[in-house]
Amino acid sequence: MQILIRLPGDSSGQQLSELRNWLLLEPQLRGRVTIIPKPADADRLGGAWDALAVALGSGGTGAALSGALSSWLSRRRQDTKIEIDRKNKKYTFTNVNSEVAREILKELESDK
């Protein structure tokens, strides 16, 4: 199963980059987080990131993602809007705190 994570208010891609680096600190997520670049427009070069794709499977990867995302959110000083795409369904959350993120990901993981 794959989950796409977007941060819509992050036009520079810096927050997405920080989140990617944070997720890769988790041993269960190493090799499972892929960068999805934004398509290049005719009037600007590419390079910005669109989303992170996280491959979930057995072995606690869902729990690892949940814990890592929750701890990343708990360290944010600003409100964060997150979009999560899974199985062609999009979930959008604003002002998400770490506990809410943990519950969201737990629910998404159980909806196989």
Image (tube, rainbow, N blue to C red):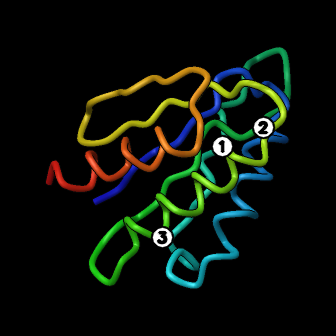
Q: Position of residue 84 (x, y in %)?
A: 44, 36
* Nearer to the camera, 30 or 35: 30
Q: Position of residue 106 (x, y in %)?
A: 31, 53
Say which amino acid is labelled 2. Answer: Ala
Tag shown at residue 64: 3
Q: Position of residue 32 (x, y in %)?
A: 50, 71
**In terms of sequence position, does the residue under pointer 1 or pointer 3 come before the other?**
1
**In terms of sequence position, does the residue under pointer 3 or pointer 2 come before the other?**
2
Closest to the camera, between mark 3 and mark 2, is 3
Closest to the camera, between mark 1 and mark 3, is 3
Say which amino acid is labelled 1. Answer: Pro
Mark 2 → mark 1, Cα distance in angstroms: 6 Å
Mark 3 → mark 2, Cα distance in angstroms: 26 Å
Q: Residue at x 78, y 40 (%)?
A: 76
Say which amino acid is labelled 3. Answer: Ala
Disc 1 is placed on an element classified as strand
Q: Residue at x 46, y 45 (%)?
A: 4
Disc 2 is placed on an element classified as loop
Q: Picture quarter containing residue 71? A: bottom right
**In terms of sequence position, does the residue under pointer 2 or pointer 1 come before the other?**
1
* Nearer to the camera, 111 or 104: 104
Compared across the picture, whether 106 is left or right of 80 comes to: left
Disc 3 is placed on an element classified as helix
Q: Are marks 2 and 1 in contact (CB under 8 Å)?
A: yes
Q: Residues within 10 Å of mark 2 (few under 14, many from 20)?
A: some
Disc 1: which residue: 37
Disc 2: which residue: 48
Q: Residue at x 58, y 53 (%)?
A: 69
